[in-house]
Each structure stands twice: as structure tokens, then as C-alpha cells.
Amino acid sequence: MPERLEKARSIGSIPINFTKGDPVKQILAIQPSGVQRTCDCVGFECVNDDLQPDEGIIIRRAVELTNTSGGIGVIGVYFAEDRSKGTPLAQGKRIADIRFPLCDFWTKNLSMQTGAVDSKVLAPTLLGLIESGRAKPSFIFTAELGIEDAMEGYRAFSEHKEIKVAFKFPYDDDSLKSKSNETAESNGTSHRVKRRKVRA
């Protein structure tokens, strides 16, 4: 999606279009010794240069690109589930097991960190960064919809008509605090909603 590549360029990244040639060769042409950190943000629903499903291609390329003693982060999703309308690439049960280049991974002394994000732990810090103006993630959104239009938003995203869709819930901060306090009072435990401040 060219629009995504332009978004990446707008924040100082060097966009690589894998449909225009081997992305490994493109990156190594810029960074001959490879990179110290690689992040898989897609997961196993990725495609190869011919736009065909290839569950492990990003991980294999990450190992190939990452320099000796470097690290790979995997935030893309890898889990098996039954085929459904929401998983069009599945054939029967989707299996997230992939072919992994363990020899190269071991020889290059690489490390890997992976797993699901615990949003409850990270949300207060991220919210503080946004409120302070240090983080401005809104540039990535191309549409803002009410939660009642969620199906429309997901469809537009799936069809590559939008880069990223934000859903706005029908309450503001004051009503959220009020609802939280009402819930606490009904449980017999009144409390205040507090926000964690992030030091600059």
C-alpha cells in the first residue's frame, strides 16, 4: 500500500517496497552489515514477493537481516484458530508453526523477545506520553468513526481503503469517571479515578 510507505517516509523512515524486489537486498544495499534490531509487526498472516501466503517469511528474513548479537522483536500474532470469515487465508485450521532458520539464528548469537502485549500495564504510560505531547500517534489515522460503525471501519481497513481507523466511544472523560464512581458505589467501595503521570 503506497500510502503506508509514504506515512513511514513522513516520520524519517526509509520505506522498502517488497513488491519492487527482494527486500533483504534492498535493505542490505543501504545497511551492508545488516541491522541491530528487527521487529516483526505482521505475524504469520504475511505474504511473499508474489503476494502468496508464507507464514514464516518475515521471521526468516529478520534472521537474515539482523546483525551478529542483534535482537528480534515479534509483536505480530502467531496462534492457531479455526477457519472463519475473519480468517480468509486459512485452509481448515490455521497453524502458526513455521520453518525457522535455527542454525543461522544460533550462529549469529541473536536474541528474540515475543509475546502478547499486556495493555493494562502499558496503557497509563502511553496515555501520559500522548497527553504530554511527547507522543503523537494520531498522524497514522486516516479515519475516525463511532463505535457503531465498527464493521464499516474494519471493512475499509481490510480493503486497504484506510491506513488505520480510530473508533470513538460515546462518552467523554467526565462521564467515564462518573460511571467508574457509580460502579464503585454500587459495589460499596467508593474511589477516585487516578491517572499516572509520566516524568519528562
Image (cartoon, grey):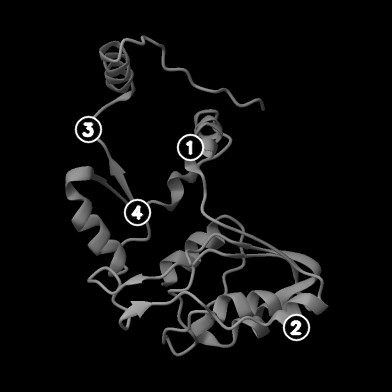
Image quarter hosting the N terminus: bottom left
Does 189 appear above or below 96?
Answer: above
User: What's the distance in space between the residues labelled 1 and 4, CA to CA?
Assistant: 26 Å
Q: Amino acid at mark 4?
A: Thr
Q: Residue at x 18, y 49 (%)?
A: 149
Question: Residue 105 appears at what percent x and percent y?
Answer: 74, 76
**Residue designated by label 1:** 120
Quadrant (top left, top right, bottom left, bottom right) of the C terminus: top right
**Which residue lies most toward the left here?**
148
Query: Nearer the N terminus, badge 2 or badge 4?
Result: 2
Could you tell me the amino acid type at mark 3? Pro
- For the point 27% across and 20% down, the residue is 179
Q: Work out whether mark 3 precedes mark 1 in sequence or the reverse, and give the earlier one.
A: 1
- Residue 15 occupies quadrant: bottom right
Q: Image quarter for residue 53?
A: bottom left
The three-letter code of the residue at mark 2 reads Cys
Q: Nearer the viewer, mark 2 or mark 4?
A: 2
